Image (tube, grey):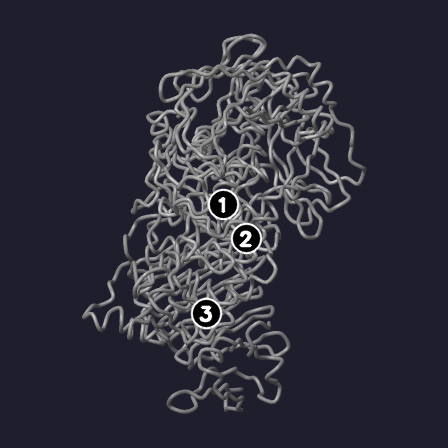
């Protein structure tokens, strides 16, 4: 399952090697970064040991290998199942000291023993783990090894968010690995850095020759010598520094080639005397007239020997490409990441990376890449016609190929990911302002529109994709370079992220953008209606566009002007959503949370899920002021599956669309209740709700997108999200088998903010009959579906669902969530702080030891009895019942068998629940009952 070796070309000389742009710049030699897989914990709180992913034995470490380690072959853990071989992340040892932050593994993937070598890669940190004023040290086999930390971004509390690390790997035999632990230390940072003079005296000896052809056959020759340009840049002060320390120094210089073409050298000098230079060819001048491709021959020489050449290279207008050249031999050391830790940082959506990656899917991706080729101006495996409908690997919070890499850290999956990141350079959306050196700002140029219809209002030439095979879009905009930059620290991928994120706004017509160029639209809800002329972008365009902007704002370096630009773009967008929806009249409606997207009368539920998932990911980064909008948006995402009492069967929301608007006198009005949505979607059209979801069995169907958003909302602590996730999961449980092949929407269920996570391998589903389902000591989800089931969770923090039927559910040890759903059920929480909801039917509920919470959010769920309510620690949660029933009167009465809770309903007062053997006089409304949202 090896990728095409054409993606990596050696010059055949010991003095120089060429690593094509498939490899990451900051770690082309390391092909660094990978993420070991597990839950994304909101708030950066780590999972306990039961939640960690231990799927198969990991790569043997240096300490575990014998002296004959040179002959040891290393491969990723592989498990063979129904879908073929699944490659899983290796298990990276966790540090056990108070100062230990994160571990990683260095592996020699080559065929020769490596000397001690320098490896560079990007690392993101859990907020607060590396506070301001502290420093980082690296240890392997108990010994400290040299480490350089170049901090690029900090969190609001001053702790390090993202840094580029350079460390000295020990000598490794072929296939040998050594574990490294990063540790917080309080000593001062070493400020000495490799001097630029040492770079000039070190034998860089790198040059680029171009023969540029015009449209009538004339040829203009150009030659750039990196050392000469560096000396000149130092004299005139135009050189910039990216890395500066005792192990690595990276300097950037730039020179014009033609009025439309520029050449940039990112020159990295290592302390061992080697150089790694990333050479970038860019045609990105926004305000220089000319929108034609550039044809040229290119030759790159290192130490007088040609290491790369290409004839008649057709450089796309408004495109870029890059190539990395190293002196000396390639260093085949790879960095294997602790993916569990990466998910804790908040940098990723809430993915369950424990599912691994299908070897066959990776091989198919590699084969496709081989067919299209790699190198300058190639397009990878990305869909060239971005607006094209249908299921695609590049659509999702992250592309399928990226998630496959994160779930396996397989080398071939990595090559595909970086090849597609390089392919982003060929897309004609690269517009850089010559005056500022930054992407063209929509703040400075509010009429900027990346569309041929824009004419020359802002740009000297109308936006065009002519000369390329690309058709660009935002509604189908893939995330191509965010993860590659985060993991590599490459300046090339950093810049590519800026271009992609700017395209997210500039592609949308300025007439559809808000007054501050927001994606939210140019309209006001007013009286809950707006005219046809007040238009807005598609919901999915808002989702993926906001994702690109938020990722850029999160990860770009603090001293990069683009950071402030995209932080401002994110801020004005979130403020706009708050103004339109939170401050607008739709806030108080039962169906609040419906986003206004382009369309006539329908809400495409999967698009809505896209947007909800993006907002939840952003909220997990603790963005100030986002929580009210998240809660507003979550209402629609969660309650559409729990609104059966209000007229909407849950299966209706797993269809492709539901009718959420109607036109009256050329004005579009929101539906104001779940019953109205049902009537418009089905009753008035003479339709019945199907018994199955849309596109069953597909990993990108309405079940998959809903599960993904609901799992993320559960991690945000949104009420009802866990219950809704359970119902949706049981509607199409078979997609769990498809995730290793197509993991774009593989969700990780987290039981509350900072709570434990449940992995896919620990989900069980019953059938249509009476099932007996027993768990283990892990955190698990068990759903009986239909029939009279017996469900036992054993240990761990479990989410247990009865489904339809008369069920018996025992949580046993752990802080469990128990849901009876339909039928007269018996629920027993057992030891632990449990959340128990009987659901419909006359249920018998027993909390067991410790403080338990009994939840009632529908009047139809009354008639229960709680056998062991302890007023000294247990509580009854009435928050959602009071909210959805419009603040009904309720009271505590003394009954013959204990305290009774009565609530006023449509037919008068009704008994909600009996607390057996409890005196009503011992209960206080403010102490034993939760009645106000936002309080616990």
Q: Quadrant of the C terminus?
A: bottom right
Closest to the observer, 841 or 299: 299
**Circle number at residue 827:** 3
Task: Check the image and name the residue furthest to the right.
Answer: 187
Give the structural element (helix, strand or loop) at label 3. strand
The reply, left or right, for residue 267 in relation to residue 447 is right
* Residue ID for mark 2: 569
Q: Are marks 2 and 1 in contact (CB under 8 Å)?
A: yes
Residue 862 x %, y %: 42, 80
Q: Is residue 520 left or right of residue 930?
A: left
Q: Quadrant of residue 840?
A: bottom left
Which residue is disc 1 drawn over? 501
For disc 2, the neighbor class at 10 Å (few under 14, some 14 to 19, many from 20) is many
Which of pointers 2 and 3 lies earlier in the amino acid sequence? Answer: 2
Q: Quadrant of the N terminus?
A: top left
Residue 920 visible here: yes
Q: Alpha-carbon distance for marks 2 and 1?
A: 10 Å
Q: Nearer the viewer, residue 936 or 401?
A: 401
Q: Secondary structure at mark 1?
A: helix
Image point (57%, 16%), residue name: 70
Residue 662 in percent (x, y) is at: 30, 71
Q: Earlier in the sequence, mark 2 or mark 1?
A: 1
**CA separation, marks 1 and 3?**
49 Å
Residue 756 is marked as none
Q: x and y percent of residue 390 in the render?
A: 29, 46
Separation (CA) of disc 2 from disc 3: 49 Å
Front residue of 586/304: it is 304
The answer to whether residue 210 is above or below residue 429 is above
Q: 374 above or below 187?
A: above
Residue 554 place in picture, x, y as percent = 58, 47
1 or 3: mark nearer the eye: 1
């Amino acid at each position: 399952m090896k990728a095409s070796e054409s993606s990596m070309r050696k010059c055949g000389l010991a003095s120089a090697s060429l690593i094509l742009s498939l490899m990451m710049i900051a770690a082309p030699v390391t092909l660094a970064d990978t993420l070991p897989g597990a839950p994304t914990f909101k708030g950066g709180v780590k999972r306990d040991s039961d939640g960690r992913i231990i799927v198969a034995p990991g790569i043997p470490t240096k300490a575990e290998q014998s002296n004959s380690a040179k002959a040891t072959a290393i491969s990723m853990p592989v498990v063979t199942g129904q879908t073929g071989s699944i490659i899983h992340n290796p298990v990276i040892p966790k540090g056990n000291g108070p100062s230990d932050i994160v571990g990683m593994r260095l592996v020699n993937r080559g065929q020769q023993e490596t000397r001690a070598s320098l490896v560079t890669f990007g690392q993101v940190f859990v907020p607060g783990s590396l506070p301001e004023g502290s420093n980082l040290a690296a240890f392997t086999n108990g010994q400290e090894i040299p480490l350089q930390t170049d901090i690029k971004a900090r969190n609001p509390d001053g702790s390090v968010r993202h840094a580029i690390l350079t460390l000295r790997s020990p000598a490794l035999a072929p296939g040998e690995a050594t574990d490294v632990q990063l540790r917080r230390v309080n000593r001062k940072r070493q400020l000495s850095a490799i001097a630029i003079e040492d770079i000039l005296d070190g034998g860089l000896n790198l040059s680029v020759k171009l023969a540029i052809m015009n449209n009538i056959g004339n040829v203009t020759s150009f030659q750039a010598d990196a050392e000469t340009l560096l000396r000149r840049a130092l004299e005139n002060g135009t050189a910039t520094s990216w890395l500066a320390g005792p192990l690595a120094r990276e300097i950037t210089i730039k020179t014009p080639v033609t009025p439309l073409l520029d050449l940039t050298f990112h020159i990295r000098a290592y302390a061992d005397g080697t150089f790694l230079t990333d050479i970038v060819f860019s045609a990105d001048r926004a305000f220089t007239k000319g929108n034609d491709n550039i044809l040229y021959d290119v030759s790159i020489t290192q130490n007088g020997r040609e290491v790369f050449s290409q004839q008649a290279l057709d450089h796309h207008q408004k495109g870029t490409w890059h190539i990395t050249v190293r002196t000396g031999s390639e260093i085949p050391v790879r960095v294997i990441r602790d993916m569990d830790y990466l998910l804790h940082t908040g940098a990723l959506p809430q993915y369950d990376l424990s599912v691994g990656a299908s070897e066959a899917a990776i091989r198919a991706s590699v084969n496709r890449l081989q067919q299209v080729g790699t190198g300058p101006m190639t397009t990878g495996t990305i869909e060239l016609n971005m607006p094209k409908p249908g299921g695609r690997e590049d659509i999702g919070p992250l592309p399928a190929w990226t998630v496959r890499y994160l779930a396996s850290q397989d080398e071939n999956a990595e090559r595909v990911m970086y090849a597609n990141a390089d392919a982003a350079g060929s897309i004609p959306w690269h517009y850089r302002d010559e005056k500022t050196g930054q992407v063209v700002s929509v703040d400075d140029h509010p009429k900027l529109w990346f569309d041929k219809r824009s004419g020359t209002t802002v740009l000297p030439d109308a936006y065009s994709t002519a000369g390329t095979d690309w058709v660009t879009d935002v509604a189908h905009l893939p995330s191509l370079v965010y993860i590659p930059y985060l993991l590599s620290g490459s300046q090339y991928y950093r810049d590519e992220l800026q271009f992609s994120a700017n395209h997210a706004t500039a592609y949308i017509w300025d007439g559809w953008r808000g007054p501050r160029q927001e994606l939210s639209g140019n309209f006001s809800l007013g009286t809950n209606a707006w005219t046809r002329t007040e238009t807005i972008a598609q919901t999915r365009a808002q989702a993926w566009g906001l994702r690109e902007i938020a990722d850029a704002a999160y990860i770009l370096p603090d001293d990069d002007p683009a950071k402030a630009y995209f932080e401002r773009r994110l801020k004005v967008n979130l403020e706009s959503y708050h103004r339109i929806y939170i401050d607008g009249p739709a806030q108080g409606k039962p169906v609040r949370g419906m986003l206004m997207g382009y369309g006539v009368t329908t809400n495409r539920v999967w698009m809505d899920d896209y947007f909800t998932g993006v907002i939840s990911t952003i909220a997990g980064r603790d963005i100030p002021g986002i929580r009210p909008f998240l809660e507003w948006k979550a209402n629609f995402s969660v309650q559409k599956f729990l609104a059966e009492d209000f007229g909407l069967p849950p299966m209706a929301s797993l269809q492709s669309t539901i009718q959420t608007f109607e036109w009256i006198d050329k004005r579009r009005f929101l539906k104001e209740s779940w019953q109205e949505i049902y009537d418009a979607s089905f009753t008035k059209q003479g339709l019945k709700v199907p018994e199955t979801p849309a596109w069953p069995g597909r990993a990108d169907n309405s079940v998959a997108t809903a599960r993904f958003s609901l799992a993320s909302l559960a991690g945000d602590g949104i009420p009802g999200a866990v219950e809704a996730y359970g119902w949706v999961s049981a509607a199409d449980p078979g997609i769990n088998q498809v995730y290793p092949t197509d993991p774009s929407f593989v969700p990780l269920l987290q039981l509350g903010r900072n709570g434990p996570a449940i992995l896919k391998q620990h989900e069980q589903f019953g059938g249509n009959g009476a099932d007996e389902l027993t768990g283990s000591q892990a955190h698990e989800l068990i759903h009986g579906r239909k029939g009279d089931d017996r469900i036992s969770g054993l240990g761990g923090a479990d989410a247990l669902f009865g489904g339809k039927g008369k069920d018996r559910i025992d949580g046993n040890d752990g802080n469990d969530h128990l849901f009876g759903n339909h039928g007269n059920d018996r629920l027993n929480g057992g030891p632990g702080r449990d959340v128990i909801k009987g659901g419909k039917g006359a249920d018998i509920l027993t909390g067991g030891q410790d403080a338990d919470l009994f939840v009632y959010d529908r009047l139809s769920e009354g008639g229960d009895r709680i056998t062991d309510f302890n007023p000294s620690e247990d509580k009854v949660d009435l928050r959602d019942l009071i909210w959805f029933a419009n603040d009904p009167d309720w009271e505590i009465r003394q009954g013959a068998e204990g305290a009774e809770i009565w609530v006023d309903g449509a037919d008068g007062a009704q008994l909600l629940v009996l607390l057996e053997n409890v005196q009503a006089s011992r209960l206080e409304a403010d102490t034993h009952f939760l009645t106000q949202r936002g309080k616990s």
